[in-house]
Amino acid sequence: KFKNALTHVVSTQERKQRFRSLCVQYGLDKLKVPWDIDTRWNSTYRLLNRCIPYKAVIGEFLRSSTPEALQLELTNGEWEQLQRLCNFLGIFFTATVQLSCSYSPTSFQLLRHLYDISKVYCHLEQAEIHDKSLTPIVDAMKQKFLKYWEDVPLVAIIANCLNPAYKKFYTIKVVQRYKDNLRLDNTGVEDYVDSKFEEMYNIYHSRMSANQNPSSSRATPRYEYKYTCVF
């Protein structure tokens, strides 16, 4: 219904001009409607984020247009539902933008964004107990999300463990809460992280030992720290 209303507004040059005039009366800039691609969540967010502030203008335009357009006018409840959807999609948009940087490190930010997304899913599922209007959308997107992110990537866990603000203790807590929010099994997270750090340390130790000069008075690496020192 929302897309049909926008299509009606921009379908002819005469309607576009009338809509621009209304925007000026409301003190708003000219509205350029972004493309919405069904398979791109961020495009839907851009569409909603751009058009929702114009709801008063869109409503007045439809009321003053054809009888068919009047049936496309959205109710306050429908606008509120679109705002909820926009807020939901916004967390994905923020994560995409911040993790798409080319000239700054992003691996240590991945776990935080995954946790934020899981928290939004959890809150929406609790809200859907009373209002199931977004249930089909949330369920479908959650299944798609879990297809790729059911398990937190190891690089994100390692980067967080090496981050002085998190270290191992808080990284484990965040991963466990992430799985709780998505209703996944959170057992064995700490053992998994320990085993991977043990594995990496053994690789490091074997390479350092192989690079030692046999004639050197030092038979072992100068600094032989166990991997747990970073925790």
Image: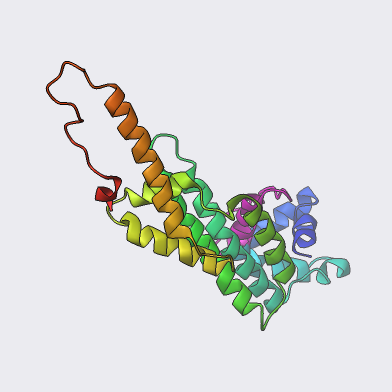
**Residue at horizontal 30%, vertical 23%?**
210
- Looking at the rendering, which quadrant does residue 205 occupy? top left
**Residue at horizontal 64%, vertical 70%?**
56
Task: Please state the horizontal and vertical placement of residue 148, each as a whole percent of the image.
Answer: 62, 50
- Looking at the rendering, which quadrant does residue 82 occupy? bottom right
Task: Please state the horizontal and vertical placement of residue 21, each as a whole percent of the image.
Answer: 65, 58
Q: What's drawn in magenta, residue-wise?
A: 23-51
Task: Please state the horizontal and vertical placement of residue 87, each as a whole percent of the image.
Answer: 57, 65
Closer to the camera, 14 or 95? 95
Left or right: residue 13 versus residue 95 is: right
**Residue at horizontal 47%, vertical 59%?**
189
Closer to the camera, 2 or 15? 2
Which residue lies most toward the right here? 68
Closer to the camera, 29 or 113? 113
Residue 39 forms part of the magenta stretch: yes
Up-down relation of residue 160 to residue 105 (above or below): below
Left or right: residue 105 versus residue 13 is: left
Which residue lies most toward the top here? 215
- Looking at the rendering, which quadrant does residue 146 occupy? bottom right
Task: Please state the horizontal and vertical placement of residue 111, each as a whole percent of the image.
Answer: 45, 54
Up-down relation of residue 21 to residue 110 (above or below): below
Q: Is residue 92 visible?
A: yes
* Quadrant holding the N terminus: bottom right
| Total numbered circles | 0
**Residue at horizontal 78%, vertical 55%?**
7
Closer to the camera, 206 or 45? 206
Which residue lies most toward the left here? 217
